[in-house]
Amino acid sequence: MTFKKRILALASAMMLVPVIAVSAMSASADTIVYGDVDGNGTVDINDATKVQKKILDMPVEVVENYDTVADVNLDNKVNVRDVTLIQMKVAALINELPVTETEAETQPETDEEGWYHKIIQP
């Protein structure tokens, strides 16, 4: 392959990269990953920390649909219950988010502010 053909092939490949990236972003933008408030595709302890900071009105970068993604118990509020469930997901104490009604019923009871008072054993 001549040098000119290699340059042309490289330039063509480089033009395809943005198209592929936009397609991947469009497909993932429709998918909600509950608990993934930083939008990196996984639920980890950083997500729980960001929710805690957001609850305390601290400046933190989160996804545009934060109120939906962070409400992992589907009670239309983002509070310490959601943080705890995200932590439980990270610790593999629950399998998936959001929690269903049945799963929520098996979670430990909270006080009026959403604090858990029982230690959960795996």
Image: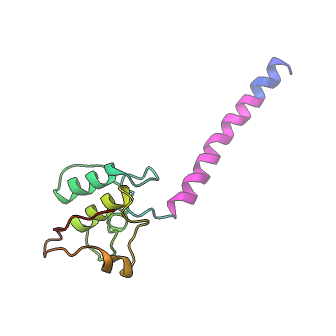
In front of the other: 113 or 3: 113
> Is 111 placed above or below 1 here?
below
- Taking 82 as reference, is 15 left or right? right
Q: Residue at (59%, 52%) from the top-left corner?
A: 24
Give the quadrant of the C terminus: bottom left
Q: Residue at (64%, 47%) from the top-left corner?
A: 20
> Is 23 placed above or below 76 here?
above
Q: Residue at (51%, 64%) from the top-left corner?
A: 31
Q: Position of residue 38 (x, y in %)?
A: 37, 51
In front of the other: 10 or 101: 101
Q: Position of residue 92 (x, y in %)?
A: 39, 59
Residue at the right extreme of this rendering: 1
Assess whether residue 26 is covered by the magenta stretch: yes
Q: Position of residue 73 (x, y in %)?
A: 33, 73
In front of the other: 66 or 34: 34
Give the magenta part as a residue range.
9-30
> Is 18 placed above or below 109 here?
above
Give the quadrant of the N terminus: top right
- Taking 58 as reference, is 31 left or right? right
Dominant secondary structure of the residues highlighted in magenta in the image: helix
Q: Can the viewer see residue 17 in this picture?
A: yes
